[in-house]
Image: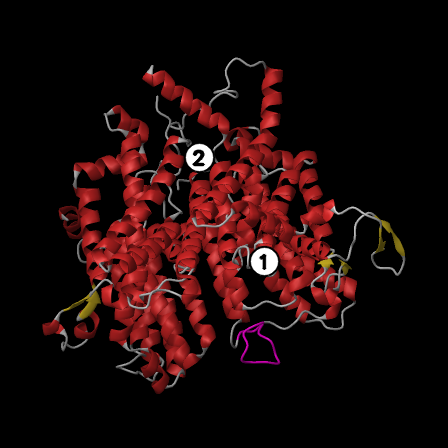
């Protein structure tokens, strides 16, 4: 924390970083003016604010704040384009789609499985093992979570069983990639197929055509009701009633940050991912660290799956995660393998999913589907390095040979 | 996810010398061993995967032998065993000739379906294999396959008055080029900024899926013009359909797409083994630094190899559309797995032309044999069988990554340490 504060202070008020952030916010404002509750019906205001955002972006970009500066330019351009589209559209349609509190609460709902997947991936990749089996781990957690819930009528047991199942799957990944030095991408791909097949098989075998157990909502992961803020403007509808797992994901996020960046264990974890030979030289067991990291990665990702099935949907169907694991991976790459930027990426992607769900009600089906593609497109742009390139841990994806 | 292209890596341990783990063998014998392993490894992997799949079936209270027998009969591969005295129509004519097999039996129809599924898997498999030879893991075969099918459906439903041969050729070539460009994005990013091709091709896969859902969905530009409430494309016009040479066109007979796929296997072998381009691709795949030192442009080969790989996969999408699907909707796009089955087939076939072909036949048969259309539900429910196929696919990929040599090294080390 102190480092962040010191960095902000050294930049000063007019630092390129600050200007870049202001630019991004201005771009968002340009769009916001045209939306409820303000409903600006003129094009002048959004265009002027958007151009200011682009100017701030270029200024920051030229002072080597590439990601923030580029982000401000993109935000300004998008702000202008979207605002012009919003001005064209009717006020009633806008009111129907843009209900800020509803959008924000569903943003949190959609972001939560992504947070678990991304943080699970963070542990594994920071230790130098690429984990594209996150999708499979989510799916495993989703099935075994709901199965255990149906079996034991206790959501705590459900979470434990889900974590165990995810850890078992991750153990295979660990043995294959660390011990046998199999290509980590191949091992991850295999596990994704395996998880898809096994959960689908067990689901059909156990529940068959009857579908999922109907009474999960009684035993599912509970919502947390905070009664005194329920009537507060804007905040009440968002935070008044959230699932326990959403709050847990915030705790996990902060805990992960503190663990990975503020404890000696975290330092060891990162050193194994960046330079395993050096880590081994100073007495850190590379294999042991990687094993622990990969297995906990599976357990954490499985929590996200358990949230999807027992906390949110209260049902399971085959391949229900539908790419959540890959969006989580995308968020991790977009957030440059760091906890808080990754969290922001999951919120952005969650918001895009929330918009994709709400847009079709007023504007027709096809607009929603394009927003579904947005997370992947943004991540592609991020790895392309147009706005500050995403580079992962140095030893990631490379098996370590003990000497 | 580091960029191997830009950074010299002094930390990477030197590759173990060939033959490590197989002690005391002469060069000739070692070569014979590796050559034999080229066959034994994949076969052993397949047997192991089917065995473990059988265990899953057994544990859940079914008889694995009768299940596998039913699946095998569904593939139509038993057709070859029924030799007799039959006559067959010579394709594209009215003449008949003597033939040892009955071309109109149920098994023959099943075999047609298996081969229809095999052809695109061969091509998506080649999509993985070609890039793999260049040291790139192209996991984006699914997206490239989808792009090929979109282009084929778009061109196949427009240009109604085009001459049939020209129409088919236009669709195939345009789809191949589109797939090459699409995969080329990942190759270009790898070559210029070192973006890891696995991440970029995964993203391109999902972009292709959602773009397709947009194009073909309600109100999308490729949605059919007659029934606005159904999200599916128009049917490809008759002139753009691939000729069916075995079976009836109305009953999803086998189109000449399988020959296109086999021709591409031959082309792949020629490209890799008999051209300068293939040599450069292999050189980059073996060791990019050495290739660069020898004056080969690594960046150019990355882009071209991804382009060729994407072209193969997209051609698979085109022959699926023009050969038997004729139309495609967002639902098909979401559940399609052809790219990943091709990936498994290519890994199983060790990226050789023959291997990819046989691997695709295995998975084509597996998918067809476990489909609800072929499998007798009284023996094994098809919903379970479909998942069994996915489990076997996963096990195949899991075990093919484990090469026996690597395992031997590990085992020997462990024994030495404990001794």
Q: Which residue is mark 1?
A: B376
Assign the magenta stretch its main secondary structure: loop
The crowding category of the residue bearing disc 2, from other C-alpha atoms within 10 Å (few below 14, some 14 to 19, many at least 20), is many
Whether labels 1 and 2 share one chain = no
* Residue B349 seen in this snapshot: yes
Q: Residue furthest left?
A: A228
* Residue B140 seen in this snapshot: no
User: Which chain is disc 1 placed on?
Assistant: B
Report the front residue among B80 and B253.
Answer: B80
Would you say A327 lies left or right of B228 here? left
Find the distance from the CA under tag 1 to the CA under tag 2: 38 Å
Q: Is residue A125 above or below residue B32?
A: below
**Image coordinates for residue B54, horizontal then vertical, percent:** 50, 44
Q: Is residue B179 above or below residue B126?
A: below
Would you say A34 lies left or right of B231 here? left
Q: Which residue is mark 2?
A: A182
Let me know if residue B223 is in the magenta part.
yes
Find the magenta span and give its range.
B220-232
Asked which quadrant contains residue A209, the reply is bottom left
Q: Which mark is residue A56?
A: none
- Helix, strand or loop at mark 2: loop
Q: What residue is rendered at 34% in x and 38% in y?
A: A128
Q: Is residue B142 above or below residue B270?
A: below
Q: Is residue B328 above or below residue A6?
A: below
Report the front residue among B193 and B87.
Answer: B87
Label count reads 2
């Amino acid at each position: 924390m102190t480092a962040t504060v010191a960095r902000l202070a050294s930049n000063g008020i007019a630092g390129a970083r600050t200007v870049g952030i202001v630019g991004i916010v201005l771009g968002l404002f340009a769009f916001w003016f045209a939306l409820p509750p303000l409903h600006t019906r003129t094009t002048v205001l959004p265009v002027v604010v958007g151009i200011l955002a682009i100017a701030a972006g270029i200024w920051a970009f030229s002072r080597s704040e590439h990601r923030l500066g580029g982000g401000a330019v993109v935000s300004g351009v998008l702000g202008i384009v979207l605002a012009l589209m919003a001005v064209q559209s009717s006020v009633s349609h806008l009111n129907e789609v843009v209900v800020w509190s509803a959008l924000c609460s569903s943003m949190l709902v959609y972001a939560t499985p992504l947070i678990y997947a991304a943080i699970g991936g963070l542990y594994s990749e920071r230790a130098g093992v690429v984990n594209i089996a996150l999708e499979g781990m989510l799916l495993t957690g989703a099935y075994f979570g709901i199965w255990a819930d149906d079996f034991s009528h206790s959501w705590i047991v459900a979470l434990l069983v889900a974590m165990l199942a995810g850890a078992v799957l991750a153990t295979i990944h660990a043995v294959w990639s660390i011990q046998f030095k199999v290509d980590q991408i191949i091992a991850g791909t295999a596990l994704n197929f395996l998880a898809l097949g096994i959960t689908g098989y067990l689901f059909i075998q156990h529940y068959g055509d009857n579908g999922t157990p109907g009474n999960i909502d009684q035993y599912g992961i509970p919502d947390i009701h905070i009664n005194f803020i329920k009537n507060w403007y804007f905040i009440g509808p968002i935070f008044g009633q959230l699932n326990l797992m959403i709050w847990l994901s915030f705790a996990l996020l902060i805990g992960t940050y503190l663990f990975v960046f503020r404890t000696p264990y975290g330092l060891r974890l990162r050193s194994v991912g960046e330079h395993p030979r050096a880590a081994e030289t100073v007495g850190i067991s590379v294999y042991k660290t990687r094993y622990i990291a990969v297995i906990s990665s599976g357990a954490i990702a499985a929590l996200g799956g358990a949230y999807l099935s027992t906390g949110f949907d209260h049902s399971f169907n085959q391949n229900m995660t539908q790419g959540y694991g890959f969006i989580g991976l995308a968020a991790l790459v977009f957030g440059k393998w760091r906890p808080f930027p990754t969290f922001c990426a999951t919120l952005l992607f969650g918001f895009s999913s929330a918009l994709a769900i709400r847009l079709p009600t007023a504007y027709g089906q096809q607009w929603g589907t394009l927003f579904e593609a947005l997370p992947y497109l943004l991540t592609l742009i991020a790895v392309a390095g147009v706005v500050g390139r995403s580079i992962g841990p140095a030893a990631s994806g490379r098996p370590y040979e003990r000497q | 996810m580091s960029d191997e292209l830009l950074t010299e890596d002094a930390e990477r341990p030197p590759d173990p010398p060939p033959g490590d783990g197989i002690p005391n063998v002469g060069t000739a014998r070692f070569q014979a061993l590796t050559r034999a392993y080229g066959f034994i490894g994949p076969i052993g992997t397949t047997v192991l995967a089917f065995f473990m799949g059988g265990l899953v079936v057994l544990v859940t209270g079914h008889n694995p032998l009768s299940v596998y027998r039913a699946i095998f009969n569904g593939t139509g591969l038993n057709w070859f065993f029924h030799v007799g005295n039959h006559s067959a129509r010579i394709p594209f004519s009215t003449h008949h000739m003597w033939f040892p097999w009955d071309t109109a039996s149920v098994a023959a129809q099943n075999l047609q379906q298996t081969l229809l599924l095999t052809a695109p898997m061969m091509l998506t498999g080649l999509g993985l294999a070609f890039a793999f030879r260049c040291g790139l893991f192209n996991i984006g075969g699914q997206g490239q396959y989808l792009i090929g099918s979109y282009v084929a459906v778009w061109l196949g439903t427009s240009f109604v008055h085009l001459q049939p041969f020209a129409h088919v050729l236009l669709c195939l070539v345009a789809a191949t080029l589109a797939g090459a460009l699409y995969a080329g994005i990942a190759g270009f990013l790898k070559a210029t900024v070192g973006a890891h091709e696995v991440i970029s091709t995964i993203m391109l896969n999902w972009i292709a899926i959602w773009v397709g859902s947009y194009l073909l969905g309600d109100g999308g530009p490729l949605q059919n013009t007659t029934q606005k409430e159904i999200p599916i494309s128009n049917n490809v016009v008759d002139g753009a359909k691939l000729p069916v040479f075995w079976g009836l066109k109305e009953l999803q007979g086998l189109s000449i797409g399988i020959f296109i796929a086999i021709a591409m296997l031959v082309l792949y072998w020629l490209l890799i083994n008999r051209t300068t381009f293939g040599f450069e691709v292999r050189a980059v795949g073996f060791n990019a630094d050495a290739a660069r030192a020898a004056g080969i442009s690594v960046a150019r080969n990355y882009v071209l190899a991804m382009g060729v790989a994407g072209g193969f996969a997209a051609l698979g999408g085109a022959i699926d559309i023009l050969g038997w699907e004729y139309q495609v909707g967002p639902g098909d796009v979401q559940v399609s797995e052809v790219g990943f089955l091709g990936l498994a087939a290519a890994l199983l076939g060790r990226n050789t032309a023959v291997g990819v072909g046989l691997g695709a036949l295995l998975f084509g048969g597996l998918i067809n044999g476990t489909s609800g259309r072929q499998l007798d539900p009284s023996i094994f429910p098809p919903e379970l069988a479909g998942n069994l196929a996915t489990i076997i696919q996963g096990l195949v990929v899991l075990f093919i990554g484990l090469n026996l040599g690597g395992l031997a090294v590990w085992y020997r080390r462990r024994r030495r340490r404990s001794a």
